[in-house]
Amino acid sequence: MLEKLYNSPKRSAYTLILIMAILSTIYNSFVPLHGDEAYYWMWSKHLQAGYYDHPPMIAFMIYLTNFISESEWGIRLVNVFSFTVTAFYIFRFTKELSDEKTALNAILIFLSVIIVNAGYIITTTDAPIILFWTLSLYYSYRALFFGSLKEYVLAGVMIGLMMLSKYTSILLITSILLFIVIKKREILFNIKFYITLSIALIIVSPMIWWNYKHDWISFLFQLHHGSTEVFKIKLESFFTFIAGQFGIFSPVFAWILFYYLYKEKLFFKNEKLFFLSLSVVVTIGLFLYKSLYKNMGLNFDAPAYIGGVIIVAIVISRYKLTKLFKWGLLIALFFSLLGRYLLLFHLDIIRKEMYNSDKVIQRVASFAKPHDKFYGDHLALAAYLKYYLPKHPDTDVATHSRYSQYDMWRKADFLQDGLVLMRNHRKDAELQKLYKNVKLIDTNVVIPKKRVFYLYRVSDPIGQ
């Protein structure tokens, strides 16, 4: 099978990328939204230069896909577009560093690993950061090694857009600057370098201004989110994070990547591979360090594997690791297909917070009266209500929950008569501090002993 693909590597790669895009779009129409997806979709209805949780790019991209469709598959066009363009550039980048067969191998690796398959499904800030990280990596490489003004300008644009996607973009910027200091210090005296910096700064300046106007609230949230006040070694989270890398990038491909980065000393003598290696090591290294004292999400360092995919493909070709490559593909595909199957047919097992949430909210609509206000007990549930209720009414969080964008938009008289949906815990006492009249009107068990929704009718807010 693989041998036939190599007869026309470029055509095979492009065909596989397009097939993945089409199948993922179809697949995504059968999977209900995750709470985070509904939350980001809500942002797209209120465009601004920044948000409490993240930079604004995810909202901008969903805003554009809304013109095509606001259904689940429509929102997830953000993912499909981002990962499709990323795949094309991985092929292009790998081809420039090696050849078309190696570039095809890079695409096979990219499309097979579970972190990418998950990325095609759930719309999060990982989609835009993956896209613009890839474009920033590629055009920075082109600028540093070939030096045309056009490529410096494109690098500045892509870096600026990357910075609007997710704050972890600072890690790629760090790795690029490290490369310049170590290998190409003459760039620091090149006016084109400062043109790149200026363009990136201009693009990101509205987001910086928004943070300044809001007391740097988003920067401080992410700083706190990724750190801890007490430095206490947690070996369990450290080893869990390491094991997770072998899971999300597959055991074989992760082993090849880490072993040859060590064996070749980050490919220090080959400037182009060293450039790629820094983007991998700086990113994974930071989160590996942080995992010593705080649990790290396995998606946090996902952009590192853009360079990782290319390095693994080149190593496989250079050292003729054909059998290992085939085993790696089989193992990666097995777990990716298994994950897709479980998400589609056994959602209650792996994503119980998504399971039947859309049907629960349709049931909420049957209790609604004209002029009711709708509330959830968490930002995700409030966003779910807005997305799945007819006509997408404005929603809010009624009870105590973590600070979110809802708190930033909230007015003093936000409590009104209406319906409050809770999940897993009854909160009669907490609601009675907010309303004079509180009545439980429905209990919905969607996963026995695991997932229970409570619906309250509330009226006469206290103190308003």
Image (cartoon, rainbow, N blue to C red):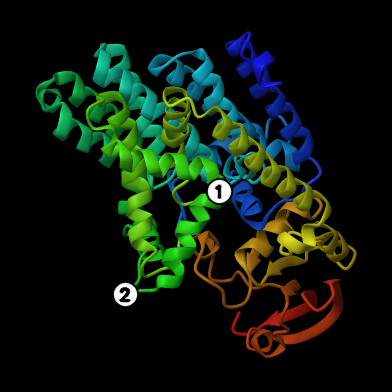
Q: How many marks?
A: 2
Q: Tell me if residue 123 can be seen.
A: yes
| Circle 1: residue type | Ile
Residue 330 percent across, percent down from the top left? 66, 38
Residue 166 percent across, percent down from the top left? 43, 45
- Callout 1 secondary element: helix
| Residue at (39, 63) in percent of width and height | 291
In front: 203, or 196? 196
Q: Which residue is mark 1?
A: 248
Locate residue 300 relative to residue 157 in the image: left or right.
right
Earlier along the polypeptide chain: callout 2 or callout 1?
2
**Residue 249 versus residue 294 in the image, above or below:** above
Quadrant in the rendering for residue 331: top right
| Residue at (22, 33) in percent of width and height | 179
**Residue 194 versus residue 413 in the image, above or below:** above
Residue 439 percent across, percent down from the top left? 81, 84
| Circle 2: residue type | Glu
- Callout 2 secondary element: loop
Q: Quadrant of the C terminus?
A: bottom right
Mark number, residue 439: none
| Residue at (67, 22) in percent of width and height | 16
Marks 2 and 1 in Cβ contact (< 8 Å): no
Locate residue 92 relative to residue 343 in the image: left or right.
left
Q: Quadrant of the N terminus?
A: top right
Is disc 1 surrounded by few (<14), some (14 to 19) or many (20+) residues within 10 Å?
Answer: many
| Residue at (39, 59) in percent of width and height | 222
Q: Which residue is mark 2?
A: 229
Residue 373 percent across, percent down from the top left? 73, 66
Is disc 2 surrounded by few (<14), some (14 to 19) or many (20+) residues within 10 Å?
Answer: few
Quadrant in the rendering for residue 95: top left
